[in-house]
Amino acid sequence: MDITKILLTLVIGTAGGLVGYKLKIPAGAMIGSLGAVALFNLFYGSLGKMPDGVMIAVQIVLGSALGLSFTKGMLTDLKTAWLPALIIAGTYLLAGVLVGLFVAKVTGWDLMTSMFSAVPGGLADVVAASQSIDGVKTVNVMVIHSVRLAMVLLSIPILVKVFGK
């Protein structure tokens, strides 16, 4: 990918990301940039693929941002949270594997793409991890997680109103 295409991709992605953010779409910056670049690719031809170095840099930034969320207070909280954390993580892992196997069977997708599509996690984190594995169809993973995130974020306020109190 030449520098012109990289810059054009970043300009289009930034514009779409800002629109998604301003519209307050769940994960709007990511979904907006994804949509803008995808639409450009569909209507004007492929911009290519980001160089591996850029993807590594993105993963470093994401890892650093996630690392900032860890504090000393979290270690104190672990004294009471470790058992529920293990139960929830184990349940998510089992459910993710079962759903991933089901998705692979129903869609015909490869097992790795299906597993990454079914794994619980943040959109940016899962997509970044999926990009580091050869053969995973990252676009499929991104679409599945975008739909999941939008459904969860849009339905929670409704569910709280209906069942809360």
Image: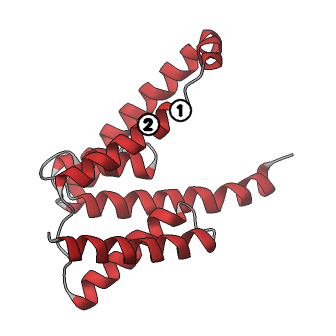
Work out whether 119 lies above or below 20.
Answer: above
Spot occupied by residue 62 in the image (x, y as percentages of width and height): 41, 44
Spot occupied by residue 45 in the image (x, y as percentages of width and height): 19, 86
Spot occupied by residue 25 in the image (x, y as percentages of width and height): 58, 68
The residue that mark 2 highlights is 64
Q: From the viewer's side, name the closer residue of 43 and 11.
A: 11
Quick one: which residue is furthest to the front in this view? 3
- Tags 2 and 1 in contact by the CB under 8 Å rule? yes
Work out whether 93 lies above or below 10.
Answer: above
Spot occupied by residue 154 in the image (x, y as percentages of width and height): 63, 63
Q: How packed is label 1: few (under 14 Cα within 10 Å), some, or many (20 or more)?
A: few
- Mark 2 element type: helix
Quick one: which residue is furthest to the right in this view? 165
Q: How far apart are labels 2 and 1 at the CA level?
A: 6 Å
User: On the image, which quarter does residue 11 sit in?
Assistant: bottom left
Q: From the viewer's side, name the closer residue of 5 and 24.
A: 5
* Residue drawn at point x = 48 percent, y = 19 percent: 86
